[in-house]
Image: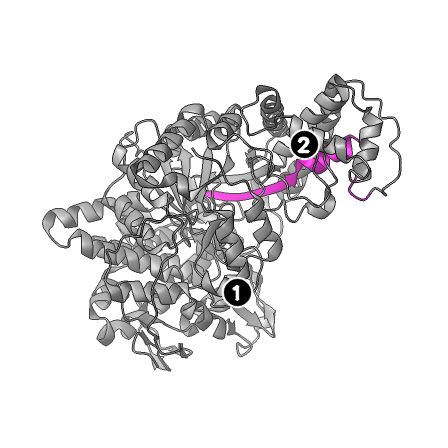
Amino acid sequence: MDKSETSFQTKQYPFPPKPSGHSCQAIPCCKPPRKKTRIHFQTATSCRRPVRLRKEIRQWAWESLHGVYGDDAMAHPYIAVDDIPDFHGLSPLEKYDAAIRQIALRAPLRICQEEQISGAATLGMAISHCVPVKYRGEVVCESVSHLTIRYDRVLKEGLSSYEQEIANRLTDKKLATSQRAFLHSLQKVIDSIGIWHGRYLEATRDVKPGIHRLLQQVPFSPARSFHEAVQSLWFLFAFLRLTGNWPGIGRIDWLLGEYLRCDLAQGILDREQAREILASLFIKGCEWIQSETPPGTGDAQHYQNIVLAGIDQDGQEIANEVTYLVLDIVEELGISDFPITLRLNARSPERLLNKAARVIRHGGGIVAVYNEDLILRSLCREGYAPQEAWMFANDGCWEVQIPGKTDFGYIPFDSLQLFNRAIGLDATDVPGTNCPNSGFQSIEDVYRAFLKELDLTIQNIYRENVLMPYTKKDGRWIRRNCPPASVVSLFEDGCIPHAASYFDFGPEYVVRSPHIGGAPDVANSLYALQKCVFEEHLVTFPEMITILRNNWADAEPLRQYVKNRYIYYGNDNDQADAWHSRILADFAKIVKQCRAGADCPVRFIPGVSTFGRQVNWLPMRAATAFGCRKGDILSGNDSPTPGTDRQGATSLIRSHCKADLVQQTCGAALDVKIFPQTLQGQNGITALKEMLRGFLRLGGYFMQLDTVDAETLLAAQREPEKYKTLSVRVSGWNARFVTLNREWQEMIIERTTQRPV
């Protein structure tokens, strides 16, 4: 066994804060002996990544990025609970409580030689988004993602404060039996964390005395230093992941900044020491990477996004030393498993823009941008109080929410399929069949037919995701068939006061968000029909439908004409962009009308995204009026259809920002790809900063930036073993390019690489 990792056999562990006599079996965690390897963290630019961390830490990062710990987790995928008497007869909540306790008792422990904080999500089935426990071969419980829990209270008050709040709440004699059972389940979560915490206390006593001292304080008591705060934050994050949940981290610089400021001022540590502590968090966060991941939609979709910078409750910029140390680490190691979104505004410091640009140019799609001023207006317009709106982060992906207060879910749909249905075009139509006379006399007739389909779809989404799952009982709203989720419920404001679970109106806000996909494709289709059919009269409407049913067979000259003659969304063409803006505005209006006068407290808000589903939607899509054949990959998120944007990133941003994006409260994602060659030297940094400022000034919402060229991606397809760490932005997540299947790789390659900024 390598000296860089310690594993533990059967032992008796103390159970803080209360003693326990349970004996627990820790499964040994082994890895191959460390091999000396040339370390090269992938970069898209000719500029070398800086070297700031010690070589031992860089080596540890390299091993983690190459799957040492993910492989180890997959060797120990779950805990079997077949040995628990009468488990089958327990209630769902009792099964959940027992499963969490068994994880705490029996999950393998891992301590790496270079780590400066401890805790690890060592059960491989958690990577598959479920509680990693099986009974008679079947998964016992669901897990939760698309949320960011509240960490600041634990840092400031300690986990023990929750015990007291729960005890006080249980004194209420009006509580229903189900509410008491839920509160007792929260107590059992704390007990389970205590078991796991006690095991790490014992395990670190001799091999990591410094970490042992940290764990004597946190997370049960308040953090008193930066190091304790990072340990407390990581320990809870790791426990949630160990139990199969995928939480975001949120505003890490707001959480940790004051601790670091005080420690630096008192000389308790210096920036280099603080950087190494934070690097531990980032490197340990790569523990689910496997050396050989089955191809799919990528290997880093664990919703552990980080938000940096932006204002605090007093309107003051919070960017601090933690902000810049986080960016230092990403700039050096290229770790993409914690996608970063910067909250930028018109007053963001020049130092922050400079640093962001230097990180972005290395590629990997790690850094994205929120337009903070616009998002704050959008949240307040939605009814959030200003004293809560400033807290916004994301759900661990990129959709905006109030962290630690929100039960969130989104419902994506393909508006291009709705458009095809509206005009009598179906992907399953038999080639050669004729289109009946539609009766469309103008492009406005076409658009009204599309709006009718859009309205029906949103109404169905509202009924299926709001009206059907929830009902009113004894004067309060509840969810039907509510699965247990006590681990995340513990850290969501409202669950203890309401004595209600995360899925049962426990959090302060319940949000469901329909997300429109394919809006740029619909806009392009409308524009092409407007020009080709109703203005230039090149074909009649029925003739065009017949052509599209035949997938443009025998109509190549016309296809080339509509594909190359017209200027589509993404090129700052007011006519084409007007269709896009109109679609988004009408979509938001329909969403708002759904909840008008509704008694149900679920917030129903619009958003714009595909999250890569343009690949999954291909079989249900037909050829398009703007020259694409059936099977072509079309627009991702709110970005142009591949190949249609020809005027560069500036024109793309202008087209996107013509829409009133304040109405898209959940968010609207724009993907921008940039040639690495355009970002060389100080001129490249300056150009990128100006692009960021332009996005804010013009009224963008959320922009995902990636710096990569098609040649590198094609080389990675040919020789994947040479590009193990090559990261690309997919949507709200990053993935190692070689872990994407062929269809998803082609989607990334086909997305237009922007011309010079």
Q: Which amino acid does label 2 sit on?
A: Lys
Disc number for residue 563 = 2
How far apart are the alpha carbons under marks 1 and 2? 38 Å
Of 63 and 548, which appears nearest the observer?
A: 548
Of 369 and 305, which appears nearest the observer?
A: 369
Residue lying furthest front = 557
In the image, 673: left or right of 239? Answer: right
Q: Is residue 219 visible?
A: no
Residue that appears at 55% across and 32% down: 646
Whether residue 426 is in magenta: the answer is: yes
Q: How crowded is mark 1: few (under 14 residues within 10 Å), some or many (20 or more)?
A: some
Considering the image in quadrants, where does the C terminus appear? top left
Magenta residues (range): 406-428
Query: Counting residues from the N terminus, which is met first, the one under dot 1 or under dot 2?
Result: 1
- Against 523, residue 397 (above or below) is below
Residue 415 spot, x, y in % from top left: 67, 35
Q: Which colour scheme is used?
A: one colour
Residue that appears at 63% across and 40% down: 634
Q: Of circles 1 and 2, which is in front?
A: 2
Residue 331 spot, x, y in % from top left: 32, 50
Q: What residue type is labelled 1?
A: Thr
Residue on which disc 1 sits = 293
- Against 561, residue 295 (above or below) is below
